[in-house]
Amino acid sequence: MGPAEKHVELLRTMIRIRTFEERVRDLFAAGQLPGFVHLSIGQEAVAAGACLALRPEDYVLSTHRGHGHMVAKGADTRRMMAELYAKRTGSCKGKGGSMHIADASVGVLGANGVVAGGLSVAAGVGLSIRQRRSGQVCLCFFGDGAANRGPFHESLNLAAIWKLPVIFLCENNGWASSTPHRYASAIRDIADRGAGYGLRGVRVDGMDALEVYAAVSRAADAARAGGGPALIEAKVVRWQGHYEGDPQGYRDKAEITEGRARDPIARLRAKLLAEKILGPEQVAEIERAALAEMEAAVAFAESSPLPAPAEALEDLFFERR
Amino acid sequence: MGPAEKHVELLRTMIRIRTFEERVRDLFAAGQLPGFVHLSIGQEAVAAGACLALRPEDYVLSTHRGHGHMVAKGADTRRMMAELYAKRTGSCKGKGGSMHIADASVGVLGANGVVAGGLSVAAGVGLSIRQRRSGQVCLCFFGDGAANRGPFHESLNLAAIWKLPVIFLCENNGWASSTPHRYASAIRDIADRGAGYGLRGVRVDGMDALEVYAAVSRAADAARAGGGPALIEAKVVRWQGHYEGDPQGYRDKAEITEGRARDPIARLRAKLLAEKILGPEQVAEIERAALAEMEAAVAFAESSPLPAPAEALEDLFFERR
Amino acid sequence: MRKLTMAEALREALIEEMTRDPRVILIGEDLRAGVPFGVTKGLAEQFGEDRVLDTPISEAAIIGASLGAAITGLRPVADMHFADFVTCAMDEVVNQIAKVRYMFGGQVDVPLVLRMPTGSVKGAAAHHSQSLEAWFTHTPGLRVVFPSTPADAKGLLKTCIRGLDPVLFFEHKRLYKMAGEVPEEETLIPLGTADVKRGGSDVTVVATGWMVHQALEAADRLGQEGLQVEVVDPRCLAPFDKATVFESVRKTNRVVIAEEAAKTGAFGAQIAAWLAEELFDHLDAPIQRVAAKDVPMPFSPPMEEFVLPDAEDIVAAVRRIL
Amino acid sequence: MRKLTMAEALREALIEEMTRDPRVILIGEDLRAGVPFGVTKGLAEQFGEDRVLDTPISEAAIIGASLGAAITGLRPVADMHFADFVTCAMDEVVNQIAKVRYMFGGQVDVPLVLRMPTGSVKGAAAHHSQSLEAWFTHTPGLRVVFPSTPADAKGLLKTCIRGLDPVLFFEHKRLYKMAGEVPEEETLIPLGTADVKRGGSDVTVVATGWMVHQALEAADRLGQEGLQVEVVDPRCLAPFDKATVFESVRKTNRVVIAEEAAKTGAFGAQIAAWLAEELFDHLDAPIQRVAAKDVPMPFSPPMEEFVLPDAEDIVAAVRRIL
Ligand SMILES: Cc1ncc(C[n+]2csc(CCOP(=O)(O)OP(=O)(O)O)c2C)c(N)n1
Ligand SMILES: Cc1ncc(C[n+]2csc(CCOP(=O)(O)OP(=O)(O)O)c2C)c(N)n1
Ligand SMILES: [Mg+2]
Ligand SMILES: [Mg+2]
């Protein structure tokens, strides 16, 4: 892909994520989806930019806010939607739901219901890549809140001493549920914690897909070359509540409205239109295609069967007994 | 106490620690003591220097290598020795032993069998000091190995955001059991991890009691003044094996002999003699007194009764039932 | 009598004890916003942010810090957010909190309450649905409390906060919104006292938490057939009120043990073991156990319902032995 | 047959499987030096430091990394150093390792073995003496293995390393130096198969780990009085070989369950519960349980001996029901 195609690809991916999640938002509000969901609307540039810098065989560890990571890494949105609908045809056969969604076929080794649960797993994936000399890299998404948990510390140190090909990518949206990052963390920039592990932490504007793409590309190249892990912090805005239905009494309206004024999609769209890389019609076509894709995903999900109750006893072990 | 008295006190404390532990080393080798023991011979300057900077009402969290911390904070060596002998008269009535030795009456809230087990507890002690406005400080000893565990990260961040009066003092002896610090940690100086929590990490020569005393004094003053926590790294040498009886096959002889050539006690003794703060006779007197104290401690321990078996059922809860 | 939800009853207990004793502090994630179950909402405004401490996502530090505070003069009530995350502070709970008093030969008291929102809520899946109380009944040095009604929750929480021993206080997520009568006057319920929620002479059902309500429903149904089912709620798993449970079984000679945890190794197995060891001659039928199937909690409702035990399962268990 | 200590037998198993399968790696603290129990000594020289990975003291990262490696093509054998420290990686074991395969609908296999040096050694005290296996039998998604002889240890470890499911492999510290016959020829012992260590018709003693040897000693003593004691070693707690245990109890109608863990909530309670629920009519006497007293392990030998169960306690338990 040339630069222009890549930019178009970034826009398409962001639009697909946004369209998927807006659909999920509405379906959840309408009571169509069980459990709870955390949306990444507004943060699409991180998932899109980071995953475009990866190869199909690379791995991703995701979080509780992981739909975007799945879409960007190439997961089938039909099976994703079916999973949120708790259907047998879902990515995890209805056993995982939004918080545990995974698609190993595209290298996504799972969202996680435990904050920071993925970081140590990512280090181990990096270890296996090194042992197998497979030339892959592992990208690990996590939030600002996760950066205050012990596994962040242990995992970065372990990946650093072993020079593992792992990219730790923090989506700093300023909030951990109702707790502001500025309160919960002793320092503003999580990237600065890299120094504790001999890593040069990198800071990027997470609302700019191109910046994210560039930073992750550099980190991936370095990792494949044996340069070891990277810590990248992408500053983003959480458009939605922590979970769908969150009244957000703890957050002042101004911050939300200002935040929503910053839109990674509008930003890249304007750029591509200005540079005549795309015309309005082509953009509209991308949007139409995304809508159609998500319509199909919903149709697939709705027409899929629920699991039979006793399927709950399957998939626990490889060995039956 | 004037400076001269303080220096003499430092020497006396180091000699008392050394004498206590050499006794323990020999008794353990002779099979007199059950369980296992970790000695701090060679690291006395840290315990002595740090605790001299504290007030009697201040708190200390110790480690598995904690005899020196206990002695320096003022614990009764008779009850300490009795604890190592597993006697009823021991600091913990024979329930703890070397790895769980504690003396709340002098503010030592315990050694710990879990590496880094004390750091989060120390943060909580700092919290209670703040809430009670008691003007105390909490000193938390830990090793270089402990600095790679998650609780180090979580506890420093928590203490930092709440500006708690806690002094995190790392005794970096270069080894975690058979694992070298240079292998296990991505960076050389643990003090540099302070930046991740907005703390200016301080590095001191842990073989120099005066340096340790000065650094901890500054940190304690700052903490009492509401300046929040401190991270201090004291570089020291582990003279003994990790535990008594450790063959140390993993460690080259040269390092051990070079290490032992550096002696914090000889160093301060020479200084005090050179400055005529003490004469040879006075030094000898301090040594005699220490020997006599530890003789008495051993005599007390040996003449003390073992616990009755059923005493094992006591001290589990405050409420009997 | 006035009715309160369990969340309101717990909040009342916290307010009363915080008012009574300035050493009582709350510490945990999202407490000021009262996320996710609303129990602590408004308390920061009432008692100040000094006493209602929101924390980073640092479970090990939060729980370890609660211990440090408890042994130096405060009375922390810590919040696990979801009981599932106790795994992130397991060393602090098991190796530190449960053992310090003992290891140190009784030198320190540990007045610490750890609130554990537990059990399943629809679609919460594998990381937000677990019932882990059995682990802690197997950890000497801990009290384990598990109320099933607003009144029990309030009376027991007050007792725990005033006590000097560490308590894991389990609160079933589905019960927060359930209302029940709660006395206006101060009521303290001693630990280790079971409560007979319904009298009966034919069979004893020992149930905990959410399953107490399933047991009462089962008792109603069976009652329509003239069967007298006695429902005993231990309320406190450690210390456990053997006397009350044994008395009931001595009378009925038949017992069903119902709990929400995964069946293998659940606390009900220990209740069964006590009966089989100490009350064997009074048992006229196999000890029946009703519990969840041995899998993580699946997300999809049909599978979740299949895995979870309910009143129907209790009815079936009773029929097996009558 | 040649004799090996359990430590030697375990090392042999590791050497054979590492030779056979390059995907097998070892990960943990102080493995190269073989501290503290010597099992892995010399393996780094033999297989290279790439496959025998010493780690920082970062239990959460070590165990989590083992999972990451296991689901992407390696077969890690992780070392917990002391089982007590699993508390520092509890989330990784319980919420990640045990659940990923299930949560993801079977998308990944988890060929991971976690070696757990367990139980008491003289004077090791509260943080280095625990028997925590019960927690993991109550965690769906895990295999729990607990051999009592060198031959069983070797045969079971080899099976576990070749398997595709996560295993917590408990090794009793006091058994490392104990010698026993170990076949030269390759022997794989399937999981979920109990072993009758001694036949007898009067009473069944189900014992695990170190207590198997205490049970055999008790059987000897009682044998001198003409009592035929059958000693059954489950070897594997999950999956559990009910068939063999039930068969024995159907024959003897009397059972003593012996384990080293603190009694309340220990795995023996689950064995008792199974018998009381599924084999009730074959029980002629109360189910006896022999286990440690419910306190953390005290340091002082007289108290430690008092807390720990032994052959004498098993003899007494048998006498109570004969
Ligand atoms: C160990 C753990 N603690 C607490 C929670 C509850 N929880 C779920 S998401 C969340 C906030 C996470 O914040 P962050 O890491 O910044 O991710 P974000 O939600 O902002 O994407 C919390 C506290 C959890 N799931 N796991
Ligand atoms: C959580 C935990 N992991 C492992 C151990 C085993 N262990 C005991 S001491 C020790 C080394 C500690 O090194 P360091 O923190 O540098 O302290 P030092 O022994 O050098 O004083 C280890 C690995 C333990 N006790 N706790
Ligand atoms: Mg966030
Ligand atoms: Mg060290």
Image (cartoon, coloured by chain):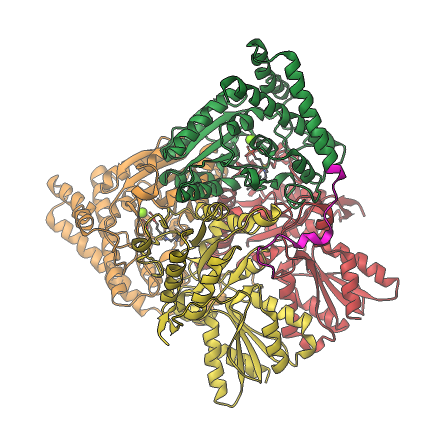
Chain colours: A green, B orange, C red, D yellow
The residue sitting at 60% across, 23% down in the picture is A12
Residue D106: x %, y % from top left: 60, 49
- Was residue D80 drawn as part of the magenta stretch in this picture? no
Q: Is residue A88 above or below residue C190?
A: above
The reply, left or right, for residue C31 in relation to residue A184 is right
Judging depth in this view, the residue of C162 and D322 nearest the camera is D322
Residue B15: x %, y % from top left: 22, 51
The residue sitting at 39% across, 56% down in the picture is D18
The reply, left or right, for residue A248 in relation to residue D87 is right
Q: Is residue B97 above or below residue D195?
A: above
The residue sitting at 84% across, 63% down in the picture is C222
Main SS, magenta region, reads loop
Q: Is residue C38 above or below residue A200?
A: below
Whether residue B310 is visible to the viewer of this picture, yes or no, is no
On the rendered image, what quadrant is the C terminus of chain C found in?
bottom right
- Was residue A308 drawn as part of the magenta stretch in this picture? yes
Q: Which residues are magenta?
A: A301-321
Judging depth in this view, the residue of C289 and A105 nearest the camera is A105
Residue D194: x %, y % from top left: 54, 71
Whether residue C318 is visible to the viewer of this picture, yes or no, is yes
Judging depth in this view, the residue of C162 and A46 nearest the camera is A46
Residue B115: x %, y % from top left: 39, 49
The furthest residue to the front: A1
